[in-house]
Amino acid sequence: MTEEKYNLPLGASLGSYPKGNSDYINQVEIVQRSWGGNFIEPKPIYPHAVEFCRHDGKWWFRDPKSRFALIVCVPDGRLLYKIDDRSMIVSGSNVLVIPQGKSYSFETIDDTTYHKNVLYLLGINVHDILETFSFNDVRLITLPSLDYLLNQFRNIYTLLSQKNAEAMAEAAGITYAILHYLSVNITSDTGKPSLFNLLKSKFSNNFRSRLDLDLVAAEYGISAKSITRMFKEYLGVTPGTFRKQARNDTACLLLQTTGLSIKEIADKLGYSSQFHFSCAFKKENGISPREFRNLHRMNM
């Protein structure tokens, strides 16, 4: 990668910590690639720059009003960000999204090396697009891992070097994909990531189709191990066991609330025959589907 000069936004300040004491700085490496310092494209949203940096020792940064929307991750080390009246520690698989126009600062917490990666976003509709993805305010998101995000950052880095319309269109598309990926990982009111709620819904529907864990993982840009880990953490079972339980729960619901025949329910749930459905149902519930229906069927 080619190292480019790091240009601070107007009014921003960057330095050692405590301020002015250079003894605290051992080494600084900042690699940034952009479309160009004064380049503004009339596109809805696009990545203006991507930054990969490594700092040793203590460091601080302040921007009184960012002209960019930022997506920040710190794969190694820890940084304390202060935005408005809030303080947030960014480290590990946490990702910080800062909307355009925010005043923010960050400083190191430890004296160790940290790695920071930042995607800088511009565009004529940045605010509206981020609001669509629920990023109208600052958000700290915990991802299953940073693998997908960092890979997309690297893809954008490569495209920025081309500096042409085709590359910008592709980079803008990757930006939308990143925002979608982050939005489904926003923690819901239940305390579970929205991504997990999507996975849970996927594994509890469409029983006629076999779900391949690796393909589902690829669809959501995470690993199969991450999916299994989430199911075990939040529900205490594997995805396969959850799907089996969900299919049985659906069978019970259909038997109680619909006039579908046993054969129709078996077909709806993806069983090869009514016989196989009846055997599986009796093994799970202790009685046959017909006996269950006679005991529990609601008034139609």
Image (cartoon, rainbow, N blue to C red):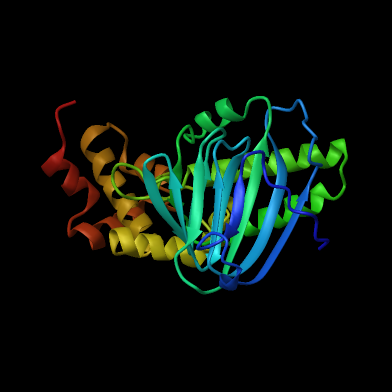
**Quadrant in the rendering for residue 148:** bottom right
Q: Residue furthest left?
A: 295
Relative placement, left or right, of 13 versus 292 is: right
Q: 160 or 11: nearer the eye?
A: 11
Q: Which residue is drawn at 67% across and 53% down?
A: 152
Residue 288 on image: x %, y % = 21, 53
**Rendered image quadrant of residue 254:** top left
Q: How many labels does the image show?
A: 0
Residue in view at x 81 percent, y 63 percent: 1
Q: Residue at 49% of width from left, 73% of height from top?
A: 111
**Would residue 148 be seen by someone viewing this image from the given angle?**
no
Q: Write the residue at 58% across / 44% down.
A: 70
Residue 138, x across and y down, in percent? 45, 40
Q: Horizontally, is 161 left or right of 217 in the view?
A: right
Q: Locate the C terminus and report the quarter of the image it occupies.
A: top left
Residue 219 vertical position relative to residue 300 in the rendered view, above or below: below
- In the rendered view, does 118 fall on the left or right side of 294? right
In this picture, residue 235 sits left or right of residue 152: left
Which one is nearer the viewer's eye here, 255 or 117?
117
| Residue 147 in view, yes or no | yes
Q: Where is residue 237 in the image (x, y as percent from the top left)?
A: 32, 64
Residue 157 spot, x, y in % from top left: 76, 53
Residue furthest to the front in view is 20
Q: Nearer the viewer, residue 213 or 226?
A: 226
